[in-house]
């Protein structure tokens, strides 16, 4: 495994709460990334199900616009992949297989200096914490 890839942000006006990372929450002065910027977005509204959500596809659109305008990502199909349940053809539906393929696409060819972004909006779940590293006893 290669060296860890990290991104540093300047945060002049916002101080994160203890345990929060400013870079993770999008508060910075833009990206200093000099390499390739790739992004994968997944938004699942679960149309027609008893668990239907209303805003996941809008979340994807808003976050995508944010990283384009704030961090210089390019809206290019070679650099951004969006999986939502309102799209056709099936290759752009957020199935398990397509999400795994999307993650593989995202990390393929990554090099030091590149910046990767992953966004998921949909239902989540919890599992019992098996290694004791979670205060609440569950992995999310």
Image: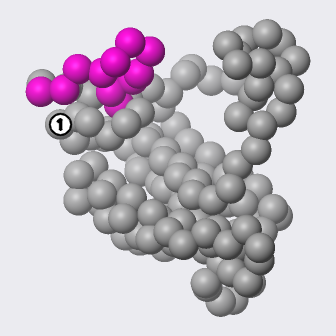
The one of 43 and 67 positioned closer to us in this rendering: 43
Tell me residue 42's x, y (percent). Answer: 60, 62
Residue 83 in view, yes or no: no
Most distant residue in the bottom direction: 88
Q: Which residues are magenta?
A: 13-23
Q: Residues within 10 Å of mark 1 (few under 14, many from 20)?
A: some
Disc tally is 1
Residue 108 is one of the magenta-drawn residues: no
Residue displayed at 53% across by 52% down: 119
State the scheme by which the image is colored. one colour
Q: Quadrant of the C terminus?
A: top right
The one of 72 and 44 positioned closer to us in this rendering: 44
Q: Quadrant of the N terminus?
A: top right
Residue displayed at 44% across by 15% down: 19
Most distant residue in the front direction: 50
Secondary structure of the magenta portion, mostly?
loop
What residue is shown with label 1?
Answer: 29
Tell me residue 14's x, y (percent). Answer: 19, 26
Residue displayed at 39% across by 59% down: 63
Residue 37 in view, yes or no: yes
> Relative to residue 61, is residue 88 depicted above or below?
below
Quarter of image, res 62: bottom left
The kind of secondary structure element at disc 1 is: loop
Along the horizontal axis of the image, is 97 left or right of 39?
right
């Amino acid at each position: 495994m290669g060296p860890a890839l990290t991104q540093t942000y300047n945060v002049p006006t916002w101080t994160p709460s203890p345990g929060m990372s400013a870079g993770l929450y999008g508060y910075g002065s833009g990206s200093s990334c000099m390499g390739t910027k790739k992004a994968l977005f997944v938004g699942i509204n679960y149309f027609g199900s008893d668990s239907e959500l209303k805003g996941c596809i809008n979340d994807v659109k808003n976050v995508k616009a944010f990283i384009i305008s704030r961090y210089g990502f390019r809206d290019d199909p070679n650099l951004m992949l969006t999986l939502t349940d309102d799209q056709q053809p099936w290759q752009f539906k957020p199935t398990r297989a397509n999400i795994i393929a999307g993650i593989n696409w995202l990390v393929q060819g990554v090099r030091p200096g590149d910046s990767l972004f992953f966004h998921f909006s949909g239902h989540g779940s919890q599992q019992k914490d098996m290694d004791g590293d979670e205060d609440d006893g569950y992995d999310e």
